[in-house]
Structure formats: structure tokens, C-alpha cells
Amino acid sequence: MLTQGISLLLKQSDINAMWKQYFKFVKLKPGKVVTSQFGEIDFSADNIGIEIIKSLYENGFPYLEITKAGKDEFDGVISEMEINEMNRKPNRLKTKINI
Amino acid sequence: MGGIAQKVYFGYHADVATFPSKPIAPLTLETSSTLTGELTMKAGKRMFEMYLTDDTGEFKIEPVGEVDGKSFVTHLTLFHPGLQSKIRGFINAAKNQNLVFVVIDNDGQKYVMGDELRPAVYAGSPDGLGTGKDVAARKGMSFEFTYKTSNIYAYTGNIPLTEAI
């Protein structure tokens, strides 16, 4: 049980350390930004939670770009979000033409 | 919850590349009081943070003007403890400069002081600058900055504390 827990923790920390593989920090030198979602984050650090980075990206944070590896890894998740977004758009009004 | 956070963020007005946009034809009262977009800095420029002693900071909105011509002057007052080189450098640089501030209140709401046309400026030191008289006195610098604006808006964007490229 304990070993499983530790290995799960290790896996998560490995993934967190890999955020730079999936996302690229752009338009600024790597460093601190006070984000509207999570407060101050130092983007020069390697160990930022991937869920935090993903959430920032999905909410339009302007200083992150997804890499090809990120697209490959998260493509399904982001596509699903885009589909949900599309479903939220109101249907076009259908007008009846009376002859 | 009253008061402001223990940090405010500032930059030089001339270093700002883009200001967040004011609402155009807003449909609700909420959107009419919220800026859209990001405060971004020119290449090589950044915003800075300034610490303030807890419970010494205030963001105050003063209505001014005649009937049918009302607008606002916003006031940021705060006290920074000590007279270290960094804060001395700040007052030397800021006293006659056009500035921009982002103030965060204790509910997490952000306010920008400064827009494309008007900056925030140093208006004085209401509680003085210096060592104080007795040993138990509070040594440090108090500041007041003002910004004149037609409307009060909240800012929902981010604050870049590292140089733009």
C-alpha cells in the first residue's frame, strides 16, 4: 500500500517536473507572474503542478503555449473542452418562411 | 473583508505596452465595471512589487466634480517599513515619474491605477518619511499615490513581474 502511494507520488512529481516539456513560457523571461487564478507563480521553477499549468493554459493565460508533446499528451482533454464550449453556443435561429 | 493585500505592484507608465481595455457598450452592470485584456510591458521592462506593513494600506475612491460631470480620484496610501536602499531608490525614481499600480484588495479584487492617457502619480507622504523621534518609533516611508479616472473598474488579468521579451 505504502509503496504504491510513494510510487504514485513519485509519478505525479515526475509529471510536474515535466511541465516545460508540454508547455512553453512565452513573451516574458522565465520568472514570476501574479496569475489571476493561482496568485504568484515562479515560471522559472521546474516543479509547478501540471494541473495548474494546464488550467492556466485552458483559461487563456497569455504567457503559455502548448508544445507538440503537450498536444500529444493532452489533446483528448483539450478537444473535449472545446467540444463542450461549442455545445454551449446557442443554436442558430430557424425562421419559418410563410408563403 | 476590508483593506488591501500586503503587496502592491507598480511600473513606469512609459514602460507599459498595453493597458487592459475599458468596456464598450456593456450589457450588464458587472461587465460595465470590469476591464478586459492584459496589462503588458514593453520589451525589457517589467512590473515590481512593494511590501507594505499590514493594515497600513488603503485604496480609497473619492468622487469629484460638479453635477453631470462627476468622476473619481483614487488614492493609494501605504507604509513601507525601514529606509533601505531599495525603498530610497524607489522614492528617488518615483517622486516625479508617471506610474501605474495594480492594487489587490483582501477579497482578491484587482484595481489598476493608470490608463493609456492618465498615470498614477506620487502625491505625498501623509504619515511622513524618516526615522521617527524615539527608539520605539516606526521608521519608514509612507506614500500616497493618486489616479484620476472617469469610472472605477476591476482588473481580471495577470501581473508580469519579469521582463517582457
Image (cartoon, grey):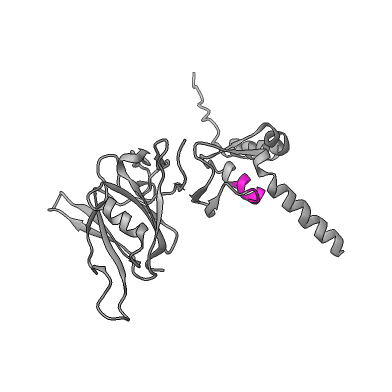
Quadrant in the picture for residue B124: bottom left
Residue found at x 68% / y 39%? A21
Camera-side residue of A46 and A41: A46
Reply above or below: B102 against B17.
below
Camera-side residue of B145 and B156: B145
x and y, in percent, of residue B87 in the image: 34, 59
Reply above or below: A78 against A47.
above
Farthest top residue? Answer: A99
x and y, in percent, of residue B26 in the image: 36, 42
Q: Overall secondary structure of the magenta stretch? A: helix
Quadrant in the picture for residue B60: bottom left
Q: Is residue B4 visible?
A: yes
Farthest front residue? Answer: B85
Q: Magenta part of the protein: which range?
A: A46-55
Quadrant in the picture for residue B54: bottom left
Reply above or below: A91 against B154.
above
Residue found at x 18% / y 52%? B70
B74 vs A17, left or right, is left
A19 vs B71, left or right, is right
Q: Is residue B105 visible?
A: no
Camera-side residue of A82 and A75: A75
x and y, in percent, of residue B52 in the image: 38, 65
Q: Is residue B57 on the magenta stretch?
A: no
